[in-house]
Amino acid sequence: MEHIISLLVENKFGVLSRVAGLFSARGYNVDSLSVGPTVDPSMSLITISTRGDDQVLEQITKQLNKLIDVIKVVDLTEKEYVERETALIKIHTRAEDRAEVFRIIEIFRARIVDSTPTTYTVEITGDAKKVEAFINQLRPLGIKELVRSGRIAIARDDAKAAAGDQKRRQTVVEAK
């Protein structure tokens, strides 16, 4: 089963190495990994996509929680979440294929970010399935180069919690 794990960590050297070491020690491959700053510059968010059974992943989650620089571990697979991935794809642009390339780009709402007489570099952003489907449509046209970012994900707000937050904000505004 696929798991997307979100780790809030202290922004210190060596943290990523220790996190990756836990996966390696358990024999799990990391499908994608993304690290970026948060609103607080002293913290970073690591998003890891991996596959494995729930029991071993639960053990990894417990081990990650024990790392001193890890503040919070969330397996987003257990929640509603929004995910995105970006890919840059350089494709051959023969004259006879250009109309097809533009049609595929339009369907997937991608965009051309660079062009030369012989290639287009196309950017697409979306969930992993959309990016994969786009790549599969372009393969017959001749992909010259492909670069994909790691997946990033964020938990969706619980509807009840969001309604409570809205009511609290409204009460504060009315009190002023």
Image: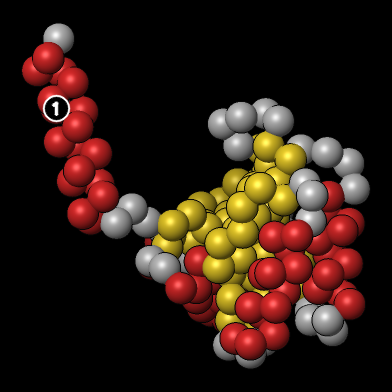
Q: Residue furthest left?
A: 174
Residue occupying image coordinates x 71% and y 30%: 42
| On screen, residue 38 above or below 107 | above
Q: Quadrant of the rendered structure where residue 54 is?
A: bottom right
Residue occupying image coordinates x 72% and y 51%: 70
- Which quadrant of the rendered structure holds the C terminus? top left
Q: Quadrant of the rendered structure where residue 31 is?
A: bottom right
Position in image of residue 33 (x %, y %) = 72, 61
| On screen, residue 103 above or below 164 | below
Q: Quadrant of the rendered structure where residue 56 is?
A: bottom right
Position in image of residue 34 (x %, y %) = 69, 55
Answer with left or right where residue 108 lies relative to residue 50: left
Which residue is at the front of the view, 152 or 176? Answer: 176
Answer with left or right where residue 16 lies relative to residue 99: right
Which residue is at the front of the view, 106 or 78? Answer: 78
Q: Residue furthest top?
A: 176
The secondary element bearing badge 1 is classed as: helix
* Number of numbered callouts drawn: 1
One can see residue 126 in this view: no
Residue occupying image coordinates x 37% and y 56%: 156
How are the colours assigned in the image?
Answer: secondary structure
Which residue is at the front of the view, 117 or 141? Answer: 141
Q: Which residue is mark 1?
A: 170
Position in image of residue 92 (x %, y %) = 70, 67
**Within 10 angstroms of label 1, few (less than 14), some, or many (20 or more) residues?**
few
Residue occupying image coordinates x 70% and y 60%: 65
Say what amino acid the circle numbered 1 marks: Gln
| On screen, residue 155 above or below 58 | above
Position in image of residue 130 (x %, y %) = 48, 71
Answer with left or right where residue 18 lies relative to residue 105: right
- Which quadrant of the rendered structure holds the N terminus? bottom right
